Amino acid sequence: MPIFDIVITVIANFAIGLLFLLACFAKVTNFAVFKATLDEYNIVPKFFVGLCAVIIVGVELAIGVGAFFVESTVGAMLAAAMLLSCYSAAIGINLLRGRRDIDCGCTGPASRQMLSGWLLVRNVVLASIAVVGAAPYTARELQPQDWALVGLALIAAMSLYAAINQLMANVPRLDALDSIMETG
Amino acid sequence: MMDNVLVVSNIILWLLVIGLGLTVLALARQVGVLYERIAPAGALMISQGPEIGEVAPQFELETLAGEPIAVGGVPASGKSTLLFFLSPTCPVCNTLIPVLKSIHRSESKWLDVVFASDGDTAVQRAFVDKKELGDFPFILSTELGMTYQVEKLPFAVLLDDKGVLRAKGLTNNREHLESLFEAMEQGVASIQEFMQKRQQDVA
């Protein structure tokens, strides 16, 4: 039974697709750092880290590309939700181990984002968007104004997402500043 | 008529939402930069701690393997020293370890590579084993890090064969590391100063 209007589905698909393409790009351009980051999570066995890094990049690319084609969107969305859940599990395990000081590796090394509970919240939101994108929708011919809506929504969502990421990356900097102030 | 009003208002609202989103992003970035700038180590990386051109403070320390090592002062070996501050929990540091090994191999005639970290000895031992750093002097010293005001890793310090501090800075990649050697050769404190000098020469 259709739940969502097709515009909502398309927005969800494209948003997740863009996200994974960008994430994949960041990982490929800094592959050595990504491998070291993955190693740092202490989840996969040492000998498997290299292969695992390649697999993750491959899956992210497949999701990113698949999200843009009608035939593969449902698969891509479900894969995205699952991959995000895996990331959340990896982050959650390290948070339980008390390791907040490792880099999350989410958006490349430049952001220097540390692990925190907020990443779990963020991943839940992203996974929900992916699930929305996989849900049945009312099919209809998309009009130019529908595409305009998709474009506007994507721009708004991306700027908001980047802003939230930036704010999360700011947290450890502020903490560092606080500790300097305290010790004088 | 009513429909038109709604469409127009919708377009305006979308533009406002996007504008606000971008504004929030810009603000968040500025806040992040501000945090970095007002943190003493971030802004005054070059001017904090021992100065370039000074004789580096001398430390009598012990390596993880239990051997005594002198850092700073005139080195008995007559070689320069590259002091590399790292931590097992810093991925960027890990990516530089092979680079440092290759630097050590190619420059061993005039350069000693020394690793410095601090924290739990067992964790560091495991790290040394994992990264095969057994051949290098590996120092655990909070004091050393404090002296050089190391706030961010990976951080490298270059001391010449007379024990004079020649270059230091945050090194995120091979190019950054090489820029330290470049700075030493050119006799400038940092690549920034080098650029400045060059600009003045041109002018």
Image (spheres, coloured by chain):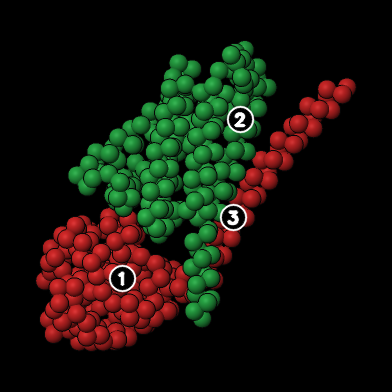
Residue under label 1, please give it.
B119
Mark 3, secondary structure of its residue:
helix
Q: Which residue is drawn at 50% across and 74% down?
A: A180
Q: Residue furthest front?
A: A96
Residue type at mark 1?
A: Gly
Q: In which quarter of the image is the N terminus of chain B?
A: top right
Mark 2, secondary structure of its residue:
helix
The disc label shown at residue B28, or none: 3
Question: Are the two marked residues, 2 and 3, in contact with CB atoms closer than 8 angstroms?
Answer: no
Residue B100, placed above or below residue B77? above
**Quadrant of the rendered structure where residue B91 is?**
bottom left
Task: Identify the subunit bearing mark 2.
Answer: A
Which hue belongs to chain B? red
- Can you give x and y, in whole percent of width and height, for residue B67 in the image? 13, 78
Residue B117, placed above or below residue A99? below
Residue type at mark 2?
A: Gly
Question: Which of disc 1 and disc 3 is earlier in sequence?
Answer: 3
Q: The green chain is which one?
A: A
Q: How crowded is mark 1: few (under 14 residues within 10 Å), some or many (20 or more)?
A: few
- Can you give x and y, in whole percent of width and height, for residue A68 in the image? 48, 24
- The residue closer to the viewer here, A140 or B26, is A140
Task: Identify the subunit bearing mark 1.
Answer: B
* Count of all numbered marks drawn on residues in the image: 3
Q: Which of marks 3 and 1 is in front?
A: 1
Residue under label 2, please give it.
A151
Distance, label 1 to label 2, CA atoms, is: 50 Å
Q: Is residue B169 left or right of residue B113?
A: right
